[in-house]
Amino acid sequence: MDRKPPKSRSEKDEGSREARLKAALKANLSRRKAQAKARGAKPGGADKES
């Protein structure tokens, strides 16, 4: 059987991936901050749900 070597990602692909992940992380952080503010929780505090 012939096995093809795994396709390596080019630097351009890696750069776009990094940008996409950075944007997703920023959006997630903003969303979590908004949720915490809506709950009236203090930033950095651990919420206990009962």
Image (cartoon, rainbow, N blue to C red):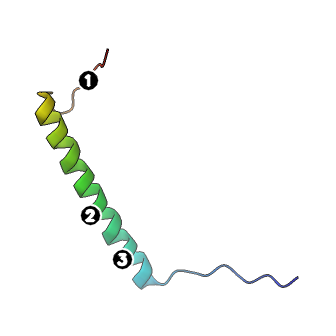
User: Closest to the observer: 25 or 38?
Assistant: 38
Q: Crowding near pointer 3: few (<14 within 10 Å), some, many (20+)?
A: few
Residue 42 is at least partly visible in this image: no
Q: Percent position (x, y) of residue 32?
A: 22, 42
Image height of 37 relative to 24, above or below: above
Q: Crowding near pointer 1: few (<14 within 10 Å), some, many (20+)?
A: few
* Residue 21 falls left or right of residue 41: right
Q: Residue at x 17, y 42 (%)?
A: 33
Instruction: Kindly identify which numbered label has been placed on residue 47.
Output: 1
Which amino acid, mark 3?
A: Ser
> In the figure, residue 50 lies in which quadrant?
top left
Query: Which quadrant of the rendered structure holds the N terminus?
Result: bottom right
Image height of 20 relative to 13, above or below: above
* Residue 34 falls left or right of residue 11: left
Which residue has dot 2 on it? 23
Which amino acid, mark 1?
A: Asp
Residue 15 is at least partly visible in this image: yes
Q: Percent position (x, y) of residue 47?
A: 26, 23
How many numbered marks have been drawn onto this rendered protein structure?
3
Which residue has dot 3 on it? 16
Q: Which residue is drawn at 84% across and 85% down?
A: 2
Which amino acid, mark 2?
A: Ala
> In the figure, residue 46 lies in which quadrant?
top left
Image height of 18 relative to 44, above or below: below
- Say which element carries label 3: helix
Instruction: Kindly identify which numbered label has been placed on residue 7.
Output: none
Looking at marks 3 and 2 on the same chain, the residue that comes earlier in the sequence is marked by: 3
Q: Percent position (x, y) of residue 4?
A: 74, 84
Q: Residue at x 21, y 47 (%)?
A: 31
Q: Crowding near pointer 2: few (<14 within 10 Å), some, many (20+)?
A: few
Q: Distance between the residues labelled 2 and 1?
A: 26 Å
- Say which element carries label 2: helix
